[in-house]
Amino acid sequence: FTVQMLTSGLLFALADVSAQEYEDYLTKSGEKPIDADHDPHDEFNWRRLIGCTLFGTFFMCPVGHWWYIHLDQYATRFFPFLSRRHFIAKAFFVVIIFN
């Protein structure tokens, strides 16, 4: 579980870094920034990066881990494991509930 948490935190950090770089690119190219509060003269937002990393590590990873374990158990109650209906049920619940 520790490796999953570290991986999740790393992926959230990389996603935020790329998002901040993209916002900086949009601002410098003259397009309207995505974030209305974004100041074009601001440097890299470390507080935002730390917040995203902590969110991914300590919230999304445990919640996602719990969700997918229980989703598989729930879908197996109603449909044979690895059947087409099993996968469709899992995809349905992911789209409707988790997303």
Image: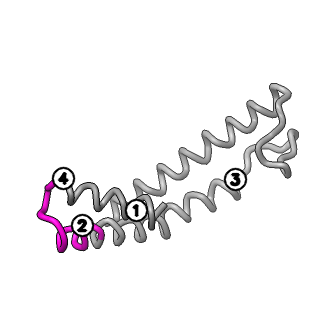
Q: Nearer the viewer, residue 66 or 79?
A: 79
The structure residue drawn at horizontal position 64% and vertical position 54%, both measured from the top left corner, is: 49
Choose the circle earlier in sequence order: 2 or 1.
Answer: 1
Kind of residue at badge 1: Met
C-alpha span from label 1 to label 3: 20 Å
Q: Main secondary structure of the magenta part?
A: helix
> Per the image, is 47 magenta?
no
Name which quarter of the figure residue 32 lies in: top right
Q: Position of residue 27 (x, y in %)?
A: 81, 34
**Residue topped by disc 3:** 46
Q: Residues within 10 Å of mark 3 (few under 14, many from 20)?
A: few
Of labels 3 and 4, earlier in sequence is: 3
User: Is disc 4 placed on a helix, strand or loop?
Assistant: helix
Q: Earlier in the sequence, mark 4 or mark 2?
A: 2
- Residue type at mark 4 is Arg
Whether label 2 touches label 3, CB < 8 Å: no
Name the residue tied to disc 4. 84
Looking at the rendered structure, the kind of residue marked 2 is Asp
- Nearer the observer: mark 1 or 3; the answer is 1
Question: Mark on residue 72?
Answer: 2
Q: Determine whether the residue tagged by mark 2 lies in a helix, strand or loop.
A: helix
Q: In the visual, does 37 lie left or right of 21?
A: right
Q: Residue 5 — which label? A: 1
Disc 2 versus disc 3: nearer the observer? 2
